[in-house]
Image (tube, helix red, strand yellow):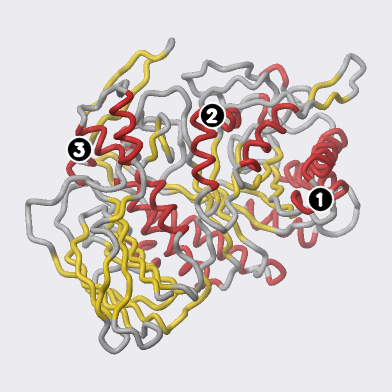
Amino acid sequence: MKFLFAIVGAGLVLVVLCTHQVAADSPATNSAAFPVTIHVDAAKPIGPLTPTWRFFGYDEANYTYMKDGKKLLSELGQLGKEQVYVRCHHLLTSGDGSPALKWGSTDIYTEDAAGKPVYNWTIVDRIFDTYLERGLKPYVQLGFMPEALSTHPQNYPHNPPTKKRAPADAGQAYPPDDYAKWGELAYQWAKHCVEKYGRSETEKWYWEIWNEPNIFYWHGTRQEYFKLYDYAVEGVRRALPAARVGGPETAGGPGGPFLREFLQHCAHETNYVTGRVGSPLDFISFHAKGSPVFTNDHVRMGMANQFRDIDRAFAVVASFPEYKQTPLVIGESDPEGCAACQDPQDAYRNGTMYSSYTAASFPREFELAEKYGVNFQGALTWAFEFEDQPPFAGFRALASDGLDLPVLNVFRMFAKMSGDRVAVDRSAGLSATNILARGVRGSPDVSALASRDEHGLRVLVWHYHDDDVPGPDAAVELKIDSLPGAKNSMKMRQFRIDADHSNSYAAWLRLGSPPVPTAEQYQQLENAGRLAEIDGPQTIALDNRAATLHFNLPRQGVSLVVLDWD
């Protein structure tokens, strides 16, 4: 393991330069490739390919309109026709908009000397304008507590140092001292958004209340959160009756008993505002995180922990008949829990461990949803970018110093898929149940997700293992049956993420890890970070509406095979 300790501003920053990720990103040379057969039946649909990947989020709200923030958001807006939603913390936090790690502020609410509310929409408008100008939609988070409303304003942070993490559990994490004023803030904000952006636009947004109220982000009781929720929802709905409202964004899947008690409140208990039974709930959200460790000089991922969070939360929702078909969004769905941290177990982030983990984990969430018969609509990736940091500084991000990381290219692959999922059999893949029980600790997981629409077939193939160590390639035999029409051939393209493709980090290492790339080097790295096609478009022969493809897929590699028949 190599580390670089760099003085940045007034702080000492640990920058993870490389681990076994470097070896895993390199072509395997220690043993022969092992055979894998993947069979796709293009005529056997198994359910719609819901674009669950189209949600992203981050702590630092003010990065939104900064240089690299706008660049990345523009790229997210180009992912495809399915709408991308963006969620960020601190939209209601007091402060002048100066950014810091795990911090943001908007100065949205203050009070005059007489205690009368003063609303300031300038910064929140700038954030939402940045999204909408790029074709993105807000996933609006009502949080955190403005200083003038906090029951603990004496603990409120003010402009934390840019290079240091702000305390997440300070004055902004407390209940309001006046719930009526809190509800009025929700009303005035929603009313302003309707007036500025239009009713039809704002009805498409998600409006969710708070973040992880079962841990340190909320210093109140559960019942106080339910009261917070009721007042916020009443305020939003008063301005926008058709607003899509929900929560509770619990940490740890159901968050112990929290999600169950929240659903019970929304379905059967007295509303704190109206006095009637129940509270509106248009979508249900919770968080699911993996648990990587650093062991034996390498990172070992913990995908099983993330799947357990999802499994437990799906089970709770399925136990409420009135909510079994309510849309579910995993409001943060990630390999671990702190994007702004830089610890040894986080050294998977820059390279292909992160991208292969993402490719392998998202499709299995469909399996878990089908197990319980719930309405799974989205899994939000809590990763963005960190402004004014060294390149590849080790944060959980989609881009670093304006350079796209391999994981962003997985989402570009997902965006090329649409229509219905079709049946896939494989000789070396695992099921969601297997991974939930044991992780990917024995043989590698080499499997695929396939989709078909009226234009063609897409097959996403990944080669994943929880341990970030070198391993042999997979010699993939991809058999595709029941292709449409009576053609003798078909156009095929293949996109790839591995050591040599779609990988700005590996390219940076090959350049000698320059802390400040030259203009020429930066252009090379930008090019290396784009989704790469291998071998160019090809024409493949069909035999009785079937095709067989052969290719080697390195460990931690991801391929997207595209067949078009138009």
The residues tagged by marks 1 and 2 sit, at their Cα atoms, a distance apart of: 32 Å
The one nearer the camera, 189 or 266, is 189
Q: Residue 297's mark? A: 3
The one nearer the camera, 70 or 519, is 519
The one nearer the camera, 459 or 240, is 459
The 10 Å Cα crowd at callout 3, few under 14, some 14 to 19, many 20 or more, is few
The residues tagged by marks 3 and 2 sit, at their Cα atoms, a distance apart of: 29 Å
- The residue positioned 55% from the left and 29% from the top of the image is 63
User: Does the image show residue 373?
Assistant: yes
Q: Looking at numbered disc 1 in the image, what kind of residue is underneath it?
A: Arg
- Label 1: which residue? 199
Residue farthest to the top, as pictured: 10
> From the viewer's perspective, is 113 left or right of 398?
right
144, above or below 230, in the image? above
Q: Looking at numbered disc 2 in the image, what kind of residue is underneath it?
A: Lys
Q: Secondary structure at mark 2?
A: loop
- The residue positioned 35% from the left and 27% from the top of the image is 391
Q: Looking at numbered disc 3 in the image, what kind of residue is underneath it?
A: Asp
485, above or below 224, in the image? below
Q: Secondary structure at mark 1?
A: helix
Q: Secondary structure at mark 3?
A: loop
Q: Say whether disc 3 or disc 2 marks the residue closer to the N-terminus.
A: 2
> From the viewer's perspective, is 288 left or right of 218?
left
